[in-house]
């Protein structure tokens, strides 16, 4: 699975907060202690302040708690949670107030790299997106969706104790609710935001091992899993190094002459272009949205892009981008 760093963002802290929230919700089902409510509030505020996409595990947790207590015909614990929800909202608004005042609400809720799709396009794209997300999470080359469903179903059948059933319900809701949320938003976000699901999937994979009765089967499973993880991580590191080697080669071509304006469709290249501009002490304008009145020195397009490159010559091409320079 993808345990390596993800572009220097706060995803590991997001994963930790999501995991702790998962544990607290699970504990709250058996004992409605005030300490759990304080922990729920504090961790949720930290999670939201780390990355706003903490909304996905947070909403999933709320829905699980309501579903669980309604299912058990005991709604009294939910009234205590409503105060915690209000405290989370107040804490998040307080922490983000400087951001709202300086940069506006759009700086938090909009992402120029993740565009909203039409409902029809979203429905047509979601099956392949979910399959690719599972491939990314499990760090396999193909069949990630089938493998993930297999792991989940196996756990449902091998665990029969009540506490195990509760955790299965909690983890499945955490997996399904985000799909509904991105459906409401009609977006297909970057795979990396799902990194917080890794602890849940890890529990499922570990749960399969606990289902084996024979010691030699447990040992064989552990050795096979270790070998698979080593192979997949080595492959992932190789792919990552290949990506950055290709990117550095492309950007070095661009900075053989100092550009002023660059149009870039690939987000990682966009980030590193700005870094290169700072490194070379030049005022570099990099746009991710095409401006018709701007004379771009270079175009960095995705291979499948339909963007017109008339008036530009090809200088670099790889599996990730195609780079054009303006005709002189």
Image (tube, rainbow, N blue to C red):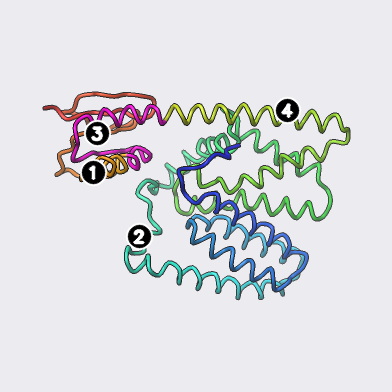
- Disc 3, SS: strand
The Cα atoms of the two marked residues, 2 and 1, are separated by 30 Å
The Cα atoms of the two marked residues, 3 and 1, are separated by 21 Å
Relative side of 251 to 89, left or right: left
Answer whether residue 105 is magenta in the image. no
Relative side of 285 to 35, left or right: left
Instruction: Say above or below: 41 vs 163.
Output: below
Q: Which residue is mark 1?
A: 281
Mark identifier at residue 299: 3
Mark identifier at residue 106: 2
- Disc 4, SS: helix
Q: Which residues are magenta?
A: 244-272
Are the residues at dot 4 and dot 3 in contact (C-beta closer than 8 Å)?
no
| 2 or 1: tag closer to the N-terminus | 2
| 3 or 1: tag closer to the N-terminus | 1
| 2 or 4: tag closer to the N-terminus | 2
Q: Residues within 10 Å of mark 3 (few under 14, many from 20)?
A: many
């Amino acid at each position: 699975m993808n345990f390596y760093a993800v572009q220097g963002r706060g995803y590991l802290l997001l994963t930790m907060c999501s995991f702790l929230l998962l544990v607290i919700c699970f504990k709250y089902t058996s004992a409605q202690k005030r300490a759990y409510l304080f922990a729920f509030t504090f961790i949720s505020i930290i999670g939201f302040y780390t990355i706003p996409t903490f909304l996905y595990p947070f909403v999933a947790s709320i829905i699980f708690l309501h579903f669980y207590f309604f299912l058990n015909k005991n709604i009294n614990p939910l009234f205590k949670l409503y105060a915690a929800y209000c405290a989370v909202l107040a804490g998040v608004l307080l922490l983000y107030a400087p951001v709202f005042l300086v940069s506006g609400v759009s700086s938090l809720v909009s992402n120029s790299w993740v565009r909203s799709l039409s409902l029809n396009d979203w429905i047509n794209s979601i099956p392949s997106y979910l399959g690719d997300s599972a491939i990314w999470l499990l760090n396999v080359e193909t069949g990630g969706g089938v493998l993930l469903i297999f792991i989940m179903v196996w756990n449902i059948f091998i665990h029969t104790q009540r506490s195990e059933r509760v955790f299965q319900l909690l983890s499945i809701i955490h997996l399904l609710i985000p799909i509904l949320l991105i459906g409401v938003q009609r977006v297909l976000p970057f795979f990396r935001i799902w990194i917080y699901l890794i602890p849940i999937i890890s529990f499922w994979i570990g749960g399969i091992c606990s289902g084996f009765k024979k010691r030699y089967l447990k040992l064989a499973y552990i050795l096979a899993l270790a070998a698979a993880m080593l192979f997949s991580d080595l492959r992932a590191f190789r792919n990552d190094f290949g990506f950055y080697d290709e990117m550095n080669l492309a950007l070095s071509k661009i900075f053989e002459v100092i550009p002023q304006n660059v149009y870039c469709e690939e987000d990682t290249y966009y980030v590193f272009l700005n870094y290169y501009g700072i490194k070379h002490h030049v005022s570099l304008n990099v746009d991710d949205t095409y401006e018709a009145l701007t004379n771009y020195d270079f175009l960095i397009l995705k291979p499948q892009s339909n963007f017109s490159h008339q008036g530009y010559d090809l200088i670099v091409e790889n599996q990730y981008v195609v780079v054009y320079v303006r005709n002189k």
